[in-house]
Amino acid sequence: MLKHTLLTIGLLTATPASADWFKGNLVLTPPDCQKLPGYACRLAEPLQYHSSETGLTWQADQWQDGNGQSGTTDGASIPLWAQKIIGDPYDESYLKAAVIHDHYCYKENHVRSWRQTHRMFYTALTHLGLPRAKAKVMYFAVYLAGPKWVDIVPGEDCGENCVKNIPYSGIRLDSDRFDDQELQAQISAMNMRLSAGDELSLEELEAAAERADSDDFFYRNGDTYEAKGAGDVEVIPRS
């Protein structure tokens, strides 16, 4: 039997079907992987989170060689600069939520929209008992500066050589922007507001993020975007 010595967070007790729950032991390998700079820890077994808000169950897979980033976590949900606000990326009080969130931010696991994925992060944090103000600043951070993606669909068929015709389809994926100093300042300011007792709803947090970066492609579009032609610059990820 394999022995995993780094970290084990046990199964939660049974809860009603309508409640949120986590299922599985969070076991990260190799030992002390969280102390290795630039190293992604590997999940020794699957971890599930069920959201009663949506009825969806989200699963982070056990790591397998050749399976991309699935089954790994590198603390990306808590970037280095934000750790003075949030805490250590491997803090057990929110690690399960961060592992699930990391998993569904990997490009091979975009089975839900970026908005749904980041909202799941918030509900998982609150289920784990994280203070609501802290969970909200973490949600604001990923909504503002976290990774985002949208499905690109071909333009409609309007006849031969029509400018609306475009063969391209796929996904526009922009990586996180946690290194953007302007966004860092917005997150720090929001942390001060929430820590001071400002009661903002999730919708108000989202609106604040969208005001802070009003020209952002993803805020201006839904879960899909119809390309406007072969030269449509909107399908090009932010550099």
Image: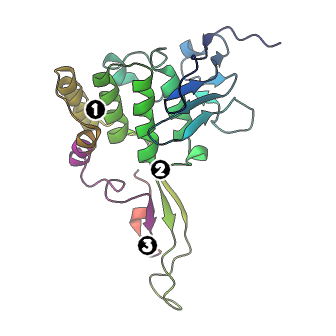
The correct choice, above or below, for 17 with respect to 5 in the image is: below
Residue neighbourhood size for the residue with mark 3, other residues' Cα within 10 Å, grouped as few (<14), some (14–19), many (≥20)? few
In percent of the image, x 43 and y 65: which residue is there? Answer: 225
- Under mark 2, the amino acid is Ser
In percent of the image, x 49 and y 29: which residue is there? Answer: 20
The total number of labels drawn is 3
Residue 217 covered by magenta stretch: yes
Q: Which segment is the magenta one? A: 207-229
Disc 1: which residue: 184
Disc 2: which residue: 113
Disc 3: which residue: 231
Q: CA separation, marks 2 and 1? A: 23 Å
* Residue 78 visible in the displayed image: no
The secondary element bearing badge 3 is classed as loop
Tell which tag, 3 or 1, sits nearer the viewer: 1
**Residue 203 placed where, x, y %?**
27, 43
